[in-house]
Amino acid sequence: MKQYLDLCQRIINEGTWVANERTGKRCLTVVNADLTYDVANNQFPLITTRKSFWKAAIAELLGYIRGYDNAADFRKLGTKTWDANANENTAWLNNPHRKGVDDMGRVYGVQGRAWRKPNGDSVDQLRKIVHNLSNGIDDRGEILTFFNPGEIELGCLRPCMHTHTFSLLGDQLYLTSYQRSCDVPLGLNFNQIQVFTFLALMAQITGNKPATAYHKIINAHIYEDQLDLMQNVQLKREPFPLPQLEINPDIKTLKDLETWVTMDDFKVVAYQCHEPIKYPFSV
């Protein structure tokens, strides 16, 4: 919580106003933020100075792991996070590559599970990583990337959290995640939950021990219509101790994650929080 609140205060103190063409709003912005999460000791980085809807974040991660490209599939898992970008993003609605209602295009998990090669074949990046880590292999290239410059126009949104690099030291598994852009009041807690959970899940299905997750953000910002709530409400609240995340131990393989896992297989223990804050969302 301290590193989250420190980042929020840093943006307020040091940020520069930058116009955002996509949303038509200004953002108070800083460049470069580094956060770390203690997955080994299960210090789940859930925001406590407002209510966090953690199930939606894990549902979204599960959709990425499955390579979903349709907002309806994400809704079935328990999250509506892609509804707006799939159906209300003007540029995407006018994009000839859009297939229809709820179509997201070739974004995030689609690239991670089916990166297209020039010959028409595809590369399943995640399956390769799981195979290597399960066999104690770290080739210094255990990289899952969603950012495909050649197909940016084929999706409704460029990936914000775009690359995840796994590192294996003995049986200790680490994760470094890179994010090009972050809506700190709304998006960051989703991203924190996903980075933490991704490492925990990958350690569990590859037979390794989770260590530390490192989260690097390039452009961290607060939108102008979020600033008052952040400054005068959330930052005035005292944080509670961090909760813990329990994952069903029966989840043992990538196939499990692809097939039967639901939000019922995740539980947060000892979560205390303040009342929700309804921050404006910018499409």
Image: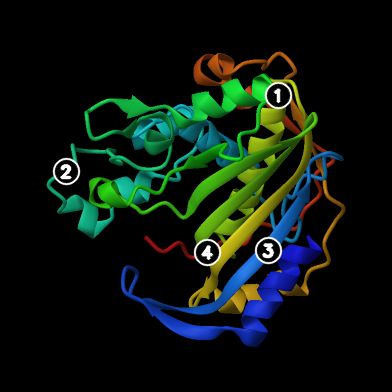
Does the residue at mark 2 contact the one at mark 4 (Cβ under 8 Å)? no
For image coordinates 50% across by 19% down, the residue present is 258
Residue 183, which numbered label? 4
x and y percentages locating residue 21 in the rendered image: 31, 74
How far apart are the alpha carbons under marks 3 and 4?
15 Å
For image coordinates 72% across by 24% down, the residue present is 204
The quadrant in which the C terminus is found is: bottom left
Q: Amino acid at mark 3?
A: Asp
For image coordinates 58% across by 62% down, the residue present is 217
In the rendered structure, which disc, 4 or 1, sits on the residue that comes first in sequence? Answer: 1
Mark 2 residue crowding within 10 angstroms, few (<14) / some (14–19) / many (20+): some
The quadrant in which the N terminus is found is: bottom right
How far apart are the alpha carbons under marks 2 and 4?
27 Å
**Residue 233 visible within the image:** no
Residue 34, which numbered label? 3
Residue 163, which numbered label? none
- Nearer to us of marks 1 and 2 is 1
- Nearer to us of marks 3 and 2 is 3
Q: Quadrant of residue 235?
A: bottom right
